[in-house]
Image (cartoon, helix red, strand yellow):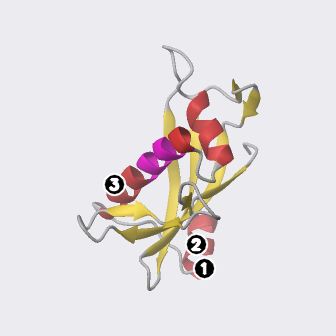
């Protein structure tokens, strides 16, 4: 644990204090739900989230190890998404239970709330989420 904190500090990343951490977690959940509905660029995140919704005994979903740095746009954060119960099937694909993710958070102009940044669509369609995830194995 101490080694992890040392590495994060050296990289300029640190866990956000409350209430910011709660606002960023809310932005992550909102973006995962939106991505699940419209498929805007985070396929693994969508599979991970959907695998946690497949039945009445859905496993708990967690956001862990959030570490952020400030930049001119807002906050750039890394975090782990963990779903209890191991890998599961969603849309006929194996959905990993643990993802390492990064996202840029910006303030919405109208409300001032923190959101995951979205980029313009390629050609036409929906905006694309800045949240990028990759599967990781439990260690």
Q: Position of residue 84 (x, y in %)?
A: 58, 30
Q: Position of residue 97 (x, y in %)?
A: 66, 36
Judged from the image, the secondary structure of the residue bearing numbered disc 2 is: helix
Please state which of residues 81 and 95 is positioned toward the viewer in this rendering: 95
- Residue extending furthest left? 111
Please state which of residues 38 and 69 is positioned toward the viewer in this rendering: 38
- What separation in Å lies between label 3 and label 1 (alpha carbons)? 22 Å
Q: Nearer the viewer, mark 3 or mark 1?
A: 3
Q: Say few, some or many: other residues with alpha carbon within 10 Å of mark 2 (under 14 / 14 to 19 / 20 or more).
A: some
Q: Can you identify the residue that label 2 sits on? A: 8
- What separation in Å lies between label 3 and label 2 (alpha carbons)? 20 Å
Q: Is residue 78 above or below residue 54?
A: below
Q: Can you identify the residue that label 1 sits on? A: 11
Location of residue 139 (image quadrant): top right
Q: Say few, some or many: other residues with alpha carbon within 10 Å of mark 3 (under 14 / 14 to 19 / 20 or more).
A: few
Marks 1 & 2, CB-CB < 8 Å contact? yes
Side (left or right) of 123 relative to 70: right
Marks 3 & 1, CB-CB < 8 Å contact? no
Q: Can you identify the residue that label 3 sits on? A: 22
Q: Is residue 109 above or below residue 39?
A: below
Magenta segment range? 28-35
Most common SS among magenta residues:
helix
Residue at 76% x, 30% y is 93
Judged from the image, the secondary structure of the residue bearing numbered disc 3 is: helix
N-terminal-most mark, 3 or 2: 2
Residue 92 visible in this rendered orientation of the protein: yes
């Amino acid at each position: 644990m101490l080694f992890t904190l040392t590495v994060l500090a050296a990289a300029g990343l640190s866990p956000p204090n409350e209430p910011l951490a709660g606002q960023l977690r809310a932005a992550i959940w909102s973006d995962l739900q939106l991505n699940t509905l419209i498929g805007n660029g985070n396929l693994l995140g969508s599979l991970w989230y959907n695998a946690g919704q497949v039945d009445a005994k859905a496993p708990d979903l967690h956001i862990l190890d959030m570490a952020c740095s400030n930049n001119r746009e807002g906050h750039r954060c890394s975090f782990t998404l963990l779903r209890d119960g191991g890998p599961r099937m969603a849309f006929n694909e194996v959905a990993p239970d643990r993802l390492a993710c990064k996202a840029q958070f910006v303030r919405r102009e109208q409300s001032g709330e923190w959101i995951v940044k979205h980029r313009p669509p390629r050609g036409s369609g929906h905006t694309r989420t800045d949240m990028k995830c990759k599967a990781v194995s439990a260690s």
